[in-house]
Image: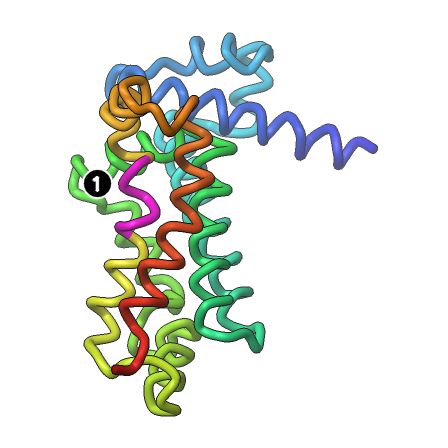
Amino acid sequence: MKDIDKSSKKEIILKSAADEFVEFGFFGARMQRIAERAGVNKAMLFYYYTSKEEIYKAVITRIFTEVIGKLEGAGKQPVSFEGLVRQIVDVYTGLFSQYPAFARLIQYELFQGGARIRELALGRIFPFSSKGGLIHAFIKEKMQAGEIREMDVLQLEVSIISQVIMPFFVKPFIEVLVQTSERYLTYQEFVERRKEFIVSLLIEGLKKR
């Protein structure tokens, strides 16, 4: 039970820290406010994380490892190409829908140069990498088998990722468009329908002519 409580508290702290970093940036964020957001005292916060840099890296690591772990799982499962695309779409959509601040924090980190993300990426095999990446190998295999058209695999991977994450990175703009649309009632409805749209667009575009 204590381990569960500890894990739950750390999760709350990380989500609260993500909100703080999104609102104030790394340099403007304050450990006291993170503690207040998480509903813990400052002493408990420092029990888990000894500095602002440590908690910032923990948040970035949390986002990165969850995405990579789920993508690696998708690459290991014997599915069709359409099934793989659906899993990739679900991974990113699920994470950023559950934790909206994570998308904005990733933007902030990238605007700062992305040093921490680069450090994490270099420490393990990325599923989309041409050097041992499971998803990259899976896509190449499907192309060689004639199931989808031959094309630049890296360009395809970047296209899939950007199609999925862009609505989360430009959420305020999408929300304005949704408000003026007769087809969608909410932003979340748009996101759910977009999942099917992306899969359909990619599958139709990659069919062998």
Q: Nearer the viewer, residue 68 or 147?
A: 147
Residue linked to disc 1: 110
Asked whether residue 137 appears in the rendered view, the answer is: yes
User: Residue at point 25% right, 60% down?
Assistant: 158
* Mark 1 residue type: Leu
Residue 192: x %, y % from top left:
46, 39
User: Residue at point 58% right, 24% down?
Assistant: 12
Q: Quadrant of residue 123?
A: bottom left
User: In the orientation shown, which residue stands out farthest toward the right?
Assistant: 1
User: Residue at point 24% right, 20% down?
Assistant: 27
The range drawn in magenta is 162-167
Residue 122: x %, y % from top left:
31, 62
Taking the image as shown, residue 188 lies to the left or right of residue 43, namely left
Residue 110: x %, y % from top left:
21, 40
Give neighbour class at mark 1: few <14, some 14-19, many 20+ (Cα, 10 Å): some
Q: Nearer the viewer, residue 155 or 50?
A: 155
Magenta segment's dominant SS is helix
Residue 93 part of the magenta-drawn span:
no
Q: Nearer the viewer, residue 192 or 89?
A: 192
Q: Quadrant of residue 119?
A: bottom left
Q: Is residue 16 above or below residue 107?
A: above
Taking the image as shown, residue 102 lies to the left or right of residue 95, namely left
